[in-house]
Amino acid sequence: MTNTTRTFPEDFLWGGAIAANQAEGAWNVDGKGLSTADIAIYRKGVAKSEYKKHNAINEEQIKTAMESTSDREYPKRRGIDFYHRYEEDLALFGEMGLKTLRLSIAWTRIFPNGNETEPNEAGLQFYDRVIDGMLKQGIEPLITLSHYEMPMYLVNHHGGWTDRKVVDYFVHFCKTVFTRYKDKVKYWITFNEIDSIVRHPFTSGGIVPERFENVEQAVYQGLHHQFVASALAVKYCHEIIPGSQIGCMLTKLTTYAHTCNPEDVLVASRDNQFNLMFTDVQVRGAYPYFTKRFFAEKGINLDMLEGDEEILKVHTVDFISFSYYMSLVSSVDGDRLEQVSGNTTGGVKNPYLQTNDWGWQIDPVGLRISLNELYSRYEVPLFIVENGIGAVDTIEADGSIQDDYRIDYFRSHIEQMHEAILDGVELLGYTSWGVIDLISYSSSEMEKRYGFIYVDQDNDGNGTLERKRKKSFSWYKDVIANNGL
Ligand code: BGP
């Protein structure tokens, strides 16, 4: 029945999100192996509009990074030292009243090379402590199994996700953590932004472009293996943890047509269709009809094992989770028109919207559109697991951080989320991205801050790492205490 009362559901999961690769640091502690996130390059000084070109990595850069021990050059190695400061951070999350915290388990803490039979006990013990800490604060864990990383051993010896064997290794990792945390964790997510392998094949897929003759073939083969691995994770999650809920995760990119010229509308509709290809496979259990032509035109031939189609069909997800930061505009004349500067996904500038300093177009109504679009297409519960604004914060003379722009961003998005619930969309919860400041994915910078909690660290890693409540901290605390209203 449709909910028409002006309220959020009683058990709505208000929360925050972080990921191992951007928060933990401690990249070489307690037996952890190297992962792609530890190798991703710091792009200090690179113009924001140049990001796209810098998403790739070459042999020489990999060699240098593998030999380096610098966490100045490679900031994700130091994160915000959540590895050693998690107790203090969880206490702050508890104080804010978070009902859930989304975080990821680093594969390389549990299996340093990714392919061992026996897990690294010290890695498991770290997550024992974190999960117990969450439960002590009354915070429901929501765990991502793969968030922008993969063991470097598998990158160098198996071509990343292009090798079918990696599916087995990943499934072994999943079974290990399901078994370990089965009595404590109910909510799981398989691959963070599973579509991201297309935008950054190295971080998400362990694919080094120059090692492949046909990079697109490698990317879609890697994606196919991730789809199968994700479906098998769903299977074993349900088997090992009765009553568990496991979802897929998508970068939701609401895309508008630049004009009502049918050619523009067609381009935008195809972009939206492509965005939903990833959920089509994971929710409906099969590649959608349009992928046949898409793959044929690109000369892509997927190597599928007998039984793959059945695996995808049977083990579909319980919910769809997604990130939402911005909307995009597509045009048949895209190349001639003014582009949105900076953001990694591109597109034409929308004159009706403002952007943050990184060119991401702020569009709360687009969130309502996205929620309705996803729900009407699939009719399964949704979960917003990333939303927020990256901004440069300033510390005032009195030591406070007056981040009203962040409050405005969240207020307007939460309002639209509420409208979508009134529209009838079934929404499990909302976790703000970077509930505490952490290292940005796309720039590896610290100055692109998302948190309600400030972390004293600059782009070069200088700072005390002290945590400070921003103005938005008490604002979000009130939102949760009043169940969103
Ligand atoms: C999503 C990622 C996150 C996070 C966020 C913000 O795509 O899942 O890991 O980083 O985007 O992006 P950025 O850090 O580049 O500003």
Image (spheres, helix red, strand yellow):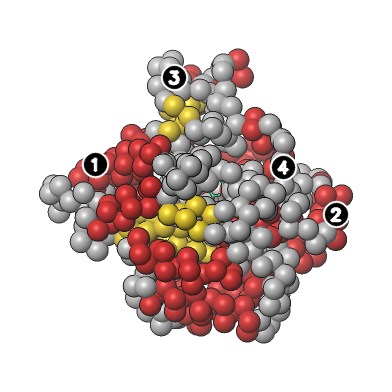
Q: Which residue is mark 1?
A: 419
Label 4 is placed on what type of residue?
Arg
Label 3 is placed on what type of residue?
Pro
Q: Is mark 4 within 8 Å of ligand 1?
A: no
Which circle's residue, 1 or 3, is located before the other in the chain? 3
Query: What residue sits 42% from the left and 41% below the top?
Result: 403
Label 2 is placed on what type of residue?
Thr
Label 1 is placed on what type of residue?
Glu
User: Residue 316: image x %, image y %?
Assistant: 43, 62
Q: Which residue is mark 3?
A: 351
Element type where label 2 sits in the image: helix
Could you tell me how far apart the alpha carbons at marks 2 and 1 are, in whole angstroms? Answer: 50 Å
In-image side of 226 versus 409 (left or right): right
User: Residue 475: image x %, image y %?
Assistant: 32, 49
Q: Are there few (<14), some (14-19), or many (20+) residues within 10 Å of tag 4?
A: some
Which circle's residue, 2 or 3, is located before the other in the chain? 2
Observer-nearest of 34 and 175:
34
Label number found at residue 440: none
Which circle's residue, 4 or 1, is located before the other in the chain? 4
Q: Nearer the viewer, mark 4 or mark 1?
A: 4
In-image side of 170 versus 480 (left or right): right
Q: Nearer the viewer, mark 2 or mark 1?
A: 2
Q: Which residue is mark 2?
A: 64
Could you tell me how far apart the alpha carbons at marks 3 and 4 are, in whole angstroms? Answer: 29 Å
Q: Is mark 2 within 8 Å of ligand 1?
A: no
Above or below, comparing residue 290 to residue 104 in the picture: above
Label number found at residue 43: 4
Q: Nearer the viewer, mark 3 or mark 4?
A: 4
Q: Are there few (<14), some (14-19), or many (20+) residues within 10 Å of tag 1?
A: some
Above or below, comparing residue 429 to residue 115 in the picture: above
Element type where label 3 sits in the image: loop
